[in-house]
Each structure stands twice: as structure tokens, then as C-alpha cells.
Image (cartoon, helix red, strand yellow):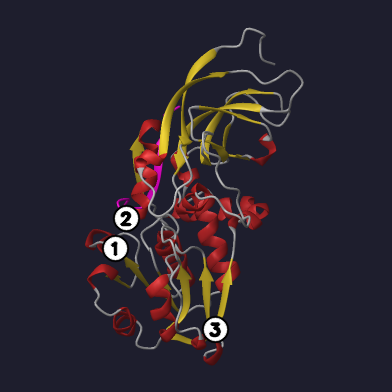
């Protein structure tokens, strides 16, 4: 248990200044100097963790806007610390399942130290032989997102034609590699030639294109998929979704993971080609990764195996220092990141 004279340490925190409309900027957030007590309240089952790596994810944009209708995840509160998935080390614990020194990942604060009131929500890290940062990505929430969105929602079969948008991002790069392991033909889109090259050379995509250089997305998809698309792993929405619907095959599946092209618009764009869903008997299904957290243990072992066998490789974009969290998060919406965006707060 913690001593009565627990240490007070400095604790830089990232807070939301006020709710955001349109594109967020770094100045919508503030890095605040505070302190943290390295102790848990007497008799509580809480834990104090030291945050090592923090994840920057597109879904966080939705939490920066005030919603009248509740979404699947609560809005951030202006003046309060942002929360995100992170990799942490337990410093103090009143919970019998966690002891100082344990390495965990789960929802934590965008700060140096966090008091976690419900440590049972954290996952213990079973494979510390990998870079710990992997637990913000390939072995964490984005990895599980790719896995369940592809296998549970899209239900792929060997030989099918798979298209992945935002294909070099935290989730997309894994969907493409899982598709290749399954024996599918896979094409990805990304927003720079560097990312397209990465898809073809490092991640083993069969083909890829830079959507910013295509005048006609429908024509680009017809070029890449003369036989059409069986599975579309949807990360962007907007014009890309409309073009994909025209190119889906009979009984194709669209796994709806995210719509990053829409997150900063005052008015979301409509979809024109929805009749394709009827004519081609397409199944479009959305999913939220938290619904699958009970399957995490099985996923972690399988993904760790693929990493050890060299069947999956992972690219991260690491920013050093908690004070750079706002810039890293905003960069996602401008395509600045190459691979999984995360912040290294402390190395141990």
C-alpha cells in the first residue's frame, strides 16, 4: 500500500480548451502543468500508472465536439484531461490483480501519470519482448479493430478481391496483411506516393494508388479491380465509398470501420450510389472494437505469432514528448503521419 507521505510529482496534462467545429487546431488543446500524487486513496481498488506511450486515433475527433445525441463514446469535457488508449506501468495499486511494475495497456489520460479508478479495464501485456509501443497499435486497439473488422464482419474467403482505404494507417496496414495471409488479392489507397510505395514494398499489397492523383476514383478502381471488389474495408467514406459501391461484386461486403473524410465537415456528404446495395445484394455493416474486447486474449496470441513468423510487419510514426500530443493528433487529419501515430511520453 502507498505510504501516507506519497510523492508528489510534476504531471503535464493535455486538456481540451473548448468544443470544436470544423477542422481542429493545436490551439483547441492546451498542455497544462499539474502535479500527481503517486498514491491510491486508502481502501480503494484504484491504481496509479505512469504513461509510457499514448495513442492518437481519428475517432478522438468526434469526442472534441459537443453532441446532443449521445455517440458510442462520450464527449471530452472542456478543461479536463483528454483520454486515449495508452501503454502504462503500474506505480501504485490497491487492486489485488495489479502490482507495481506491471505493464498494461488500456484507456488512460493524456498526461504523465493517471489514477485509474477501474484497473480491471486494463489489459496486462503478455509479450513484453515486442516494442511496448506495439500495444498502442498492432497488439492493441487498432490491431484488434483490423482483425475483427476483417474476419468477423467481412468474413473473407480465399481468392476474394479486397480493397482497403487509408491503407497505410494504424488499421489499414494490418487489414491488407491479414488479407494476404488469408489468400486474397488486396489493393490499397493512400494519400502520398511514399505511402503507396510502402503498401507495395513493405506490406505486400498487390497494388495501390494515390487517391490525390486520381481524377476519377471509379476509373482507378476499375483499373485495379477489373473483376470488381468482394470486400471493402471502409476507413474514409465520402467520394471513395460512392466509387466503391459502383465496383462491388454480387454479395460483396463493406466493413464500416471509420469515415475520416467526414469528421471535420460541418455537413456530412451524402452517398449517391446506395441503390448498388440493393442491386448487388451488398452487406454494409458497422462495428465498434470495444464490443470485441472479450476476444482480445485470443487475438493477442495470434497476432504475436504472425509478428514472430515475420508474416506481419508494422510501421509506427512516433512523436517524442507529451507536449507534442496536440500536433500529433491534428496531423492525422492532414495525412502527416506515416503509419500508426503515437506519442512517446516516457521510455520506462
- The circle on residue 231 is none
Q: Residue at x 29, y 63 (%)?
A: 191
Quadrant into which the N terminus falls: top right
Q: Main secondary structure of the magenta part?
A: loop
Q: Secondary structure at mark 3?
A: loop
Tell me if residue 336 is in the magenta stretch. yes
Q: Report crowding for label 2: few under 14, some 14 to 19, many 20 or more residues within 10 A (C-alpha).
A: some
> Which residue is label 1 attached to?
191
The answer to whether residue 57 is left or right of residue 49 is left
Q: Residue at x 28, y 60 (%)?
A: 195
> Which residue is label 2 attached to?
335
Q: Residue at x 37, y 53 (%)?
A: 23
* Boundaries of the magenta span: 335-348
Q: Secondary structure at mark 1?
A: loop
Q: Are marks 3 and 1 in contact (CB under 8 Å)?
A: no
Residue 312 locus on image (x, y percent): 42, 57
In the rendered view, would you say 278 is above or below 148?
below
Q: Are marks 3 and 2 in contact (CB under 8 Å)?
A: no
Q: Report crowding for label 1: few under 14, some 14 to 19, many 20 or more residues within 10 A (C-alpha).
A: some
Q: Nearer the viewer, residue 266 or 222?
A: 266
Q: Report crowding for label 3: few under 14, some 14 to 19, many 20 or more residues within 10 A (C-alpha).
A: many
Disc 1 and disc 2: Cα gap in Å?
7 Å
Could you tell which of marks 3 and 2 lies nearer the N-terminus?
Answer: 3
In the rendered view, would you say 226 is above or below 324?
below
> Which residue is label 3 attached to?
282
Q: Nearer the viewer, residue 301 or 239?
A: 239
The answer to whether residue 145 is left or right of residue 196 is right
Is residue 345 at all visible to an observer of this figure?
no
Q: Nearer the viewer, residue 122 or 336?
A: 336
Disc 3 and disc 2: Cα gap in Å?
30 Å
Amino acid at each position: 500500500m502507498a505510504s501516507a507521505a506519497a510523492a508528489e510529482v510534476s504531471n503535464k496534462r493535455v486538456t481540451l480548451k473548448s468544443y470544436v467545429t470544423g477542422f481542429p487546431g493545436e490551439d483547441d488543446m492546451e498542455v497544462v502543468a499539474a502535479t500527481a500524487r503517486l498514491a491510491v486513496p486508502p481502501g480503494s481498488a484504484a491504481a496509479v500508472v505512469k504513461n509510457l506511450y499514448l495513442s492518437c486515433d481519428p475517432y478522438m475527433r468526434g469526442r472534441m465536439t459537443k453532441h446532443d445525441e449521445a455517440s458510442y463514446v462520450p464527449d471530452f469535457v472542456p478543461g479536463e484531461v483528454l483520454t486515449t488508449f495508452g501503454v502504462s506501468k503500474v506505480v501504485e495499486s490497491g487492486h489485488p490483480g495489479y502490482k507495481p511494475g506491471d505493464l498494461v495497456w488500456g484507456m488512460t489520460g493524456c498526461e504523465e501519470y493517471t489514477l485509474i479508478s477501474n484497473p480491471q479495464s486494463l489489459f496486462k501485456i503478455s509479450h513484453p519482448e515486442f516494442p511496448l509501443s506495439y500495444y498502442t497499435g498492432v497488439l492493441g486497439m487498432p490491431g484488434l479493430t483490423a482483425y475483427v473488422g476483417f474476419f468477423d464482419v467481412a468474413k473473407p474467403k480465399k481468392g476474394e478481391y479486397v480493397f482497403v482505404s487509408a491503407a497505410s494507417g494504424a488499421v489499414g496496414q494490418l487489414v491488407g496483411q491479414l488479407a494476404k495471409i488469408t489468400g486474397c488479392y488486396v489493393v490499397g489507397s493512400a494519400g502520398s506516393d511514399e505511402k503507396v510505395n510502402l503498401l507495395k514494398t513493405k506490406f505486400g499489397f498487390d497494388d495501390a494508388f494515390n487517391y490525390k492523383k486520381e481524377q476519377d476514383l471509379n476509373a482507378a478502381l476499375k483499373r485495379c479491380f477489373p473483376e470488381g471488389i468482394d470486400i471493402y474495408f471502409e476507413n474514409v467514406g465520402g467520394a471513395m465509398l460512392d466509387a466503391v459501391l459502383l465496383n462491388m461484386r454480387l454479395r460483396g461486403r463493406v466493413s464500416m470501420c471509420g469515415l475520416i473524410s467526414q469528421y471535420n465537415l460541418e455537413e456530412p456528404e451524402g452517398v449517391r450510389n446506395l441503390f448498388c446495395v440493393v442491386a448487388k445484394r451488398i452487406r454494409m455493416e458497422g462495428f465498434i472494437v470495444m464490443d470485441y474486447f472479450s476476444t482480445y486474449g485470443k487475438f493477442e496470441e495470434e497476432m504475436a505469432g504472425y509478428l514472430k513468423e515475420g508474416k506481419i510487419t508494422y510501421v509506427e510514426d512516433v512523436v517524442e514528448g507529451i507536449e507534442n500530443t496536440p500536433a500529433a493528433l491534428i496531423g492525422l487529419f492532414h495525412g502527416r503521419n506515416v503509419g500508426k501515430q503515437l506519442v512517446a511520453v516516457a521510455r520506462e
